[in-house]
Amino acid sequence: MTLRLRRHHVLCCVGFRGEGYDDAFRANMSRLVYQQLRTPEGPDQEILITGNADAICAPCPHRVGLGCAEQAKIDRLDNDHGAALGIAAGDKLTWGECLDLVRQKIAPEDLDTICTGCVWLPMGLCKTAVARLKAGDAPPDAPKPE
């Protein structure tokens, strides 16, 4: 089954470490990341890049229909991430190809620009994850969903 992801959610999935807006969001994100993407089969997972709400947005408390209560910020994040990664809404690729794009095109310090305004940026989780990915390391263990 194809997983729909917004452009900025590619890096969110790389950097995810079990944090989230609420229990429902954390559980959904954990399921997607730990049971679909960070598995031996994960690199083959088909991804459809979307310009609307995606699998991660489903339980988000900021979701408004197919959009977001903070739509202008989300559009900017998607545009900046899409430009940095070279992806656009409608693109189809695998999770492994997404990871390759991150390895090739993103440096940890790039997040200071493309992730401006993200509440998770100051925690440094995504910068650490991008650095580890570029170095060929696996992400550190994080709580798995029950």
Image (cartoon, rainbow, N blue to C red):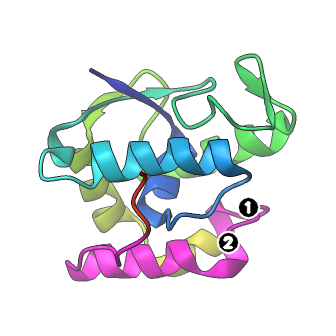
Q: Amino acid at mark 2?
A: Leu
Residue bounds of the magenta highlight: 113-142
- Taking the spot 42% from the left edge, 44% from the top edge, the residue there is 31
Q: Nearer the viewer, residue 59 or 80?
A: 59
Pinpoint residue 68: horizontal percent, then vertical percent. 79, 31
Q: Secondary structure at mark 2?
A: helix
| Badge number at residue 104 | none
Q: Nearer the viewer, residue 50 or 124?
A: 124
Q: Are marks 1 and 2 in contact (CB under 8 Å)?
A: yes
- Taking the spot 43% from the left edge, 53% from the top edge, the residue there is 145
Q: Amino acid at mark 1?
A: Cys
Q: Is residue 124 visible?
A: yes
Q: In the rendered image, which residue does mark 1 sit on?
A: 118
Is 7 displayed left or right of 101 in the figure? right
Quarter of the figure that contains the N terminus: top left
- Taking the spot 29% from the left edge, 42% from the top edge, the residue there is 36
Q: Residue furthest top?
A: 65
Pinpoint residue 38: horizontal percent, then vertical percent. 27, 55
Q: Does 10 appear in magenta?
A: no
Is 19 displayed left or right of 99 in the figure? right
Is 41 displayed left or right of 60 in the figure? left
| Badge number at residue 121 | 2
Q: Is residue 5 above or below residue 53?
A: below
Disc 1 to disc 2, C-alpha distance: 6 Å
